[in-house]
Amino acid sequence: MSVLVSGTVALDSIHTSTAAHENLLGGSASYASLAAALSAPVHLCAIVGTDFPAEHRALFAAKKIDTANLEETEGKTFSWTGRYHDDMNHRETLAVDIAALEKFNPQLTPAAAASKILLLANMSPENQLAVVKQCTASPFVILDSMDLWINIAREGLLEVMKKADLFVINEDEAKLFTESGNLVKAGQRLLAMGPRHVIVKKGEHGSMIFGPDGQFFTTPAYPLEAVADPTGAGDSFAGGLAGHLAATGATDFPALCRAAVVGGVTASFTCEAFGVARLAALDRASLDTRMAHFRHVTGW
Ligand code: AMP
C-alpha cells in the first residue's frame, strides 16, 4: 500500500543556542516523506522553485520517493527561518517567504490519487482540501495542522477536519484551538469537531490518542540524551505513522496505537541532527533496533 504525502518542501534556516545552519532541506512534506519511506512506497506532492537544489531531489530519488507530483515553478522555493531557545521546547519563526507556495495548485497523477493512505502534512487548509478531493480510493486521511491555520484559516481547517480519519496536532495548538488548558478535554473537543481520531503530540513527553466510543491510548516518547534540532519532529511522527499504516494495511484503533509508537521513535532520530540529516541517513534496521529498545524500556 502506498502513502501520498502532501505539504511543504522548503529551504530552512535553523538557529539554536549552539549552532546555526542555512538553506537546509526542510518543509513538512520532506520530513514526512522521508519518514514514511522507511516503511512504504511514497508519492510526494508539493511545489518548489527553480532554485531547489538537485541534491535534494537526488535524496528523494535515493529513497524511492515518487516526485512526479513535485511541481517546479519559476522563482524561489518556500523558505522558513526559526530559532530555538535554550530548552529546545520553544521556537520562534524569524522569517517566512511563501514564494513558490503561492502558486501551489496540486494536480495528482492517477497513481498518487489512488493511494490508500493520505497524509495532509502542514500547509494551507485550502491546498489540503484540493488534494483530498482528487483522491480516488477513499484513503485513510491523516491531517496535520498548526497555529497559523488555526488563527487565519479556521473555517477551511474545520472543513478538512470533517474529512479526516486522524487529526494530529501538538499540545499547545490543541489548547489554543479548543481554549482548554486540559489535554483530555482538548482531545475530546477536537474529536467533536469531526475527525474520527485525534492525536495530541506532547514533544518529549510522547502522545495521546483519542478514538470513537471513548477509546484512549497514551505513550511516552523515546528518551534522548541530547537534542540537536527538533525541527520536523512532528512531521516525522506523522510520516512514520502513515508509513506503518500503509505497510500493515490495518487502520483500527490498536493499529493506530502501534503506528503512533513507530512515529514517535522515528521522530526521535530526527531530533538527533540538524534538518533531515539523521532521517536521511536512517535505515530500517536502526529503526527496528530502537523500536525493540523502546518496547524494552516501556514494557510495551
Ligand atoms: P515541525 O517542527 O514538525 O513543526 O515542522 C517544521 C517544518 O515545517 C519546517 O521544515 C518548515 O519548513 C515547515 N513549515 C514552517 N512553517 C510552515 C507553514 N506555515 N506551512 C507548512 N510548513 C511550514
Image: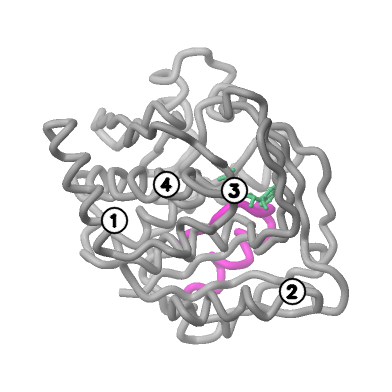
Q: Is residue 222 visible?
A: yes
- Range covered by the magenta-colored residues: 119-135
Question: Marks 4 and 1, Cα distance to the nearest angstrom?
Answer: 10 Å
Indicate the position of residue 103 as horizontal and vertical percent values.
81, 69
Is mark 4 in CB contact (under 8 Å) with mark 1?
no
Disc 3 element: helix
Disc 2 element: loop
The residue to which callout 2 is attached is 52
Tell me the kind of residue under disc 4.
Answer: Ala
The residue to which callout 3 is attached is 159
The residue to which callout 4 is attached is 267
Tell me the kind of residue under disc 1.
Answer: Leu
At x 24% / y 32%, what residue is drawn? 215
Indicate the position of residue 247 as horizontal and vertical percent values.
26, 67
Q: Can residue 150 be seen in this view?
A: no
Disc 4 element: helix
Give the number of the mark in front: 2 or 3.
2
Give the number of the mark in front: 1 or 3.
1
Tell me the kind of residue under disc 2.
Answer: Phe
